[in-house]
Amino acid sequence: MLKTAICDLFSIKHPIVQGGMVHVATAELVSAVSNAGGLGIIGAGNAEPDWVKEQIRLTRQQTSKPFGVNILLISPFAKDVIEVVLQEKVSVVTTGAGNPGVYIPQLKQAGVKVMPVVASVALAIRLERIGVDAIVAEGMESGGEVGETTTMGLVPQVADSVRIPVVAAGGIGDGRGLAAALALGAQGVQMGTRFVCSEECIAHTAYKEKILKARDRSTVITGQTTGYSLRCLENKLTRQFVEMEKAGATKEALDLFGRGRVYQGLIEGKLEEGSLVAGQIAGLIKEIKPVKHIIEEMVAEAEALLAQLNGLHTEVQRG
């Protein structure tokens, strides 16, 4: 069994974290991941505090295992969601789209374990200094908001720069990705797109099927002129967005054009008008499976690969 520092930190069986995806990381998926031995994460996104509270309580009805909440720091409700997390005694918080430093003291005082998502070594170092418990180093292969460094380049640099556990994210969807992440110095992985294509995820069926049909070059990045780069499956919307950027559209115009598009894509299944958030790993996903099967198959494949590599190392030593 693969047991790492992440397993000990969060009291989970497998070093696998589910990404806190907006709209689709709800109690159904979160509880399934936690019940299967991973760490399920509710995606708060821009949701109001009452919705987050409801999801926390629904998750607790479906699992007694640890789970967390992902807080989007640019959300107008971020502060209120943190209050809900504290009131509901959630044990883990992951954060994205910003520096959670201002919230760390109250979270740590309440015993909450904090694991921010970062896209740079510098931010990882700063966050370790202010007391976070672990870091998710997310490469630009991931779906949603992306940075500029690949997972292969980012993870080992972050792992070499901090003493706290590092979780790799971006471009990971099977046991090969898990084994590779461990080889890069990570103590576990975070996945989003792979879990979208699970039976328990509430994402629209048309969106899931679009992921299954994806190839290695099916995703594009939009919004680079706005400071909010987003990786999605290419469609009519992304082409229109890119044309607007090339034509010099203002940030305000682009924000207005993109408003509500993620919900349209992920929940309403509008394949051309909606934003179909997905990572580059989409091209590797060919089947919708129960979460339990996804996790168990992934761990078994990683264990077999690591044993094979260890055997190769032994043969080299003997040679």
Image (cartoon, grey):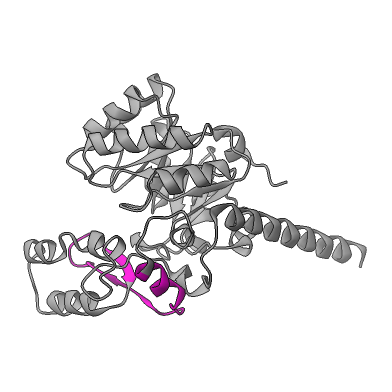
Q: Quadrant of residue 207?
A: bottom left
Asked if residue 281 can be seen in this view, the reply is yes
Residue 118 in the image, given as x and y percentages of width and height: 39, 49
Rendered view: 250 above or below 102: below
Asked if residue 181 can be seen in this view, the reply is no
Left or right relative to 273: residue 103: right
Residue 303 in the image, given as x and y percentages of width and height: 72, 56
Point out the image quarter for the C terminus.
bottom right
- Of 59 and 140, which appears nearest the observer? 59
Residue drawn at 69 percent across, 61 percent down: 301
Residue 306 in the image, given as x and y percentages of width and height: 73, 58
Residue 22 in the image, given as x and y percentages of width and height: 31, 52
- Of 290 and 86, which appears nearest the observer? 290
Residue drawn at 30 percent across, 41 percent down: 99
Residue extending farthest to the top is: 109
Left or right relative to 270: residue 67: right
Rendered view: 310 above or below 158: below
Rendered view: 70 above or below 243: above
Residue drawn at 55 percent across, 57 percent down: 290
Magenta span contains residue 28 = no
The stretch in magenta equals 206-232
Residue extending farthest to the right is: 318
Magenta span contains residue 207 = yes
Rendered view: 218 above or below 127: below
- Of 62 and 10, which appears nearest the observer? 62
